[in-house]
Image (tube, grey):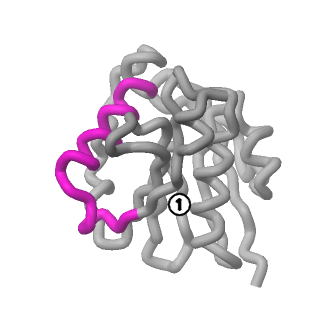
Amino acid sequence: MTSEAVAATVHRAWAADLDARMLYELLRLRVDVFVVEQACPYAELDGRDLEDRARHYWLGGRPSPVLGCLRLLEEQGGEYHIGRLCTARSARGRGLGKRLMEAALAEVGDRPCVLDAQDHLAGFYAGLGFAVTGPSFDWDGVVHVPMRREGRG
C-alpha cells in the first residue's frame, strides 16, 4: 500500500459545503471510473449531487489526488441511499472502498439503507450487512443488483 493511501483521511461534506474545485475532483474521479474506464457512456451527472440532503465522502484530496469517493443521499421517507462508490485505479485493493462505506454507514446508523451494486461487487456489500432484494438488472450496460441493509433500531 502506498503511503498516500495509508495516510488518506476520510472527508465528509454536505453538498452545499463543497467548493467548486472539490466537487469537480469528485465528479472527475466518478467519470474516470464509471464512464471512461468501464466504457459506459451514461449521464453520470444525475442532478442529485447538490440536493440539500446529499453528503459526499472522499479519501485524499488537497494537496493529494482524490483516491475514492461515494455519495450518501437521505430520501424523503428517511431511508438512506449510497451510490457512486469508486476508487481510483491506482488505489484499488487497499481497503479504501471499505473505509468509505464504514464512514457512511456510521452516519446512517440504525436506519435502513439501499444501494444498487454492480453484480460482481455484491459480496463486498454483503460483508457490510447488505442483502440482495431483487433480480439483477442492466444499468447502461452494467449488470447491477438492488441491495438493502435493514435498520437495526
Q: Is residue 97 above or below residue 1?
A: below
Given the current orientation, which residue lies at the most extreme left position? 20
Please provide percent x and percent y for residue 152. Answer: 77, 78
Instruction: Identify the residue shown where x is 30% and y is 63%.
Output: 15
| Mark 1 neighbour density, 10 Å: few (under 14) some (14–19) many (20 or more) | some
Residue 55, x across and y down, in percent = 41, 63
Kindly state the secondary structure of the residue where label 1 is placed. Answer: strand
Location of residue 110 by image quarter: bottom right
Q: Residue 14: where, in percent of width, then height?
A: 35, 67
Q: Position of residue 58 (x, y in %)?
A: 46, 49
Report the front residue among 95 and 42: 95
Residue under numbered circle 1: 81
Quadrant location of the N terminus? Answer: top right
Name which residue type carries label 1.
Answer: His
Look at the image and say whether residue 106 sits in the magenta stretch.
no
- Residue 84 visible (yes or no): no
Nearer-the-camera pick, 91 or 5: 5
Q: Which residue is located at x 24 percent, y 41 percent?
A: 24
Q: Please tell me whether residue 21 is drawn above or below residue 94 in the rendered image.
A: below
Magenta stretch: give its range.
13-33
